[in-house]
Image: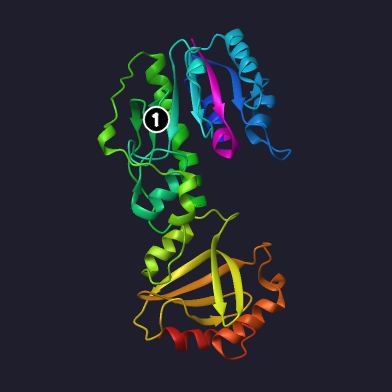
């Protein structure tokens, strides 16, 4: 029976651990401990689940020596990572009798790094989940399993995350079974085909250029988490307004206006011209996350200035006039 330490965080980690604990092959292994991140808030779903199952837990903000001693006492064979934001040091990897495997939401070696979903939303039609061995080189270990392609066109990043949360646990169970039965086989990654997607690169990659086509702008907004939004600035004479856009619809339409012009705006909706059409923004806020009725009146006053006429609510007939 394989002794397994589960390493992860959040809903993704919780779903993975729950699937493992209730799997039909649980007679092949035993979860002997959980490593998770320290919770910024008072809620850590993986930690809560681990406590319910009386599993030994250690948080990763403990000093390295404490974690090493904790792992040594448990004597694990296998480690399983599902959503863990930190690189595992080599001295920790060596404490596992067999190895550690990681669930990475991309078709490795493409989109290695900490922001694979954003990179694929911007550039790909399909997403593949990979399970690979953890090595000292980040996301470079040999591949154990891959999922079938998942179509992600037009999906928001949160929706993709939920889809992965359903598919990944099934894939990890398949991996565990093959390892426990010693039928697994690793294949090396092709390093020459590697693409990286890191969070620190996102600021310029997720910056909206209104001269781009509407589908590309739509992808940028899809790739931003709802708690962040795509930040855009509008200028009118000496005034400036900064917004966070969360959701939109691309409308390809031949228009005469220059890109980046506000055609319509109120506290709930915006119509903005782009390179080959119009972006219909249906969810946005100020930088303090005020939305809808809570948007400051100064915003609607600014919108009126930009479009040159007083509009205080969304008139569907006027939108039809603009779009048709």
- The reply to whether residue 14 is visible in this rendering is yes
Query: Which corner quadrant holds the C terminus?
Result: bottom left
32 relative to 113, above or below: above
Mark 1 — residue?
Answer: 131
Residue at image coords 66%, 23%: 62
Q: What count of labels does the image hold? A: 1
The answer to whether 117 appears left or right of 291 in the picture is left
Residue at image coords 56%, 84%: 306
Crowding around mark 1 (Cα neighbors within 10 Å: few <14, some 14 to 19, many 20+) is: many
- The reply to whether residue 223 is visible in this rendering is no
Q: Which residues are magenta?
A: 1-14
Q: Position of residue 22 (x, y in %)?
A: 55, 26
74 relative to 316, above or below: above
The answer to whether 122 appears left or right of 83 in the picture is left
Q: Give the residue at the far right of this rendering.
A: 42
At mark 1, the secondary structure is strand
């Amino acid at each position: 029976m394989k002794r397994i330490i589960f390493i992860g965080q959040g809903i993704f980690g919780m779903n993975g651990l729950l699937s493992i604990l209730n799997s039909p092959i649980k007679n092949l292994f035993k979860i002997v401990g959980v490593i998770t991140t320290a919770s910024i808030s008072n809620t850590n779903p993986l930690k809560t689940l681990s406590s319910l199952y009386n599993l030994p837990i250690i948080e990763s903000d403990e000093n390295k020596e404490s974690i090493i001693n904790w792992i040594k006492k448990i004597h694990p064979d296998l480690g399983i990572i599902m959503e863990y934001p930190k690189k595992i040091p080599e001295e920790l990897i060596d404490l596992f009798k067999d190895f550690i495997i990681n669930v990475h939401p991309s078709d490795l070696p493409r989109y290695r790094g900490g922001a694979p979903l954003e990179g694929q939303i911007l550039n790909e039609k399909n997403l593949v989940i990979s399970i690979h061995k953890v090595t000292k080189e980040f996301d470079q270990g040999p591949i154990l399993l891959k999922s079938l392609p998942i179509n992600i066109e037009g999906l928001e990043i949160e929706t993709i995350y939920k889809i992965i949360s359903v598919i990944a646990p099934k894939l990890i169970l398949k991996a565990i079974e093959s390892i426990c039965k010693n039928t697994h086989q690793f294949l090396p990654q092709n390093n020459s085909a590697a693409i990286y997607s890191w969070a620190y690169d996102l600021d310029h990659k997720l910056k909206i250029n209104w001269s781009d086509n509407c589908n590309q702008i739509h992808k940028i907004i899809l790739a931003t988490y709802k708690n962040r939004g795509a930040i855009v600035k509008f200028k009118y004479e000496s005034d400036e307004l900064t917004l966070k856009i969360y959701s939109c619809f691309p409308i390809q339409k031949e228009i005469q206006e220059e890109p980046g012009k506000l055609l319509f705006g109120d506290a709930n909706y915006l119509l903005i011209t782009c390179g080959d059409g119009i972006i219909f923004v249906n969810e946005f806020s100020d930088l303090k996350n005020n939305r809808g009725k809570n948007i400051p009146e100064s915003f609607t006053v600014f919108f009126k200035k930009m479009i040159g006429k007083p509009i205080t609510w969304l008139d569907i007939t006027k939108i039809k006039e603009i779009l048709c």
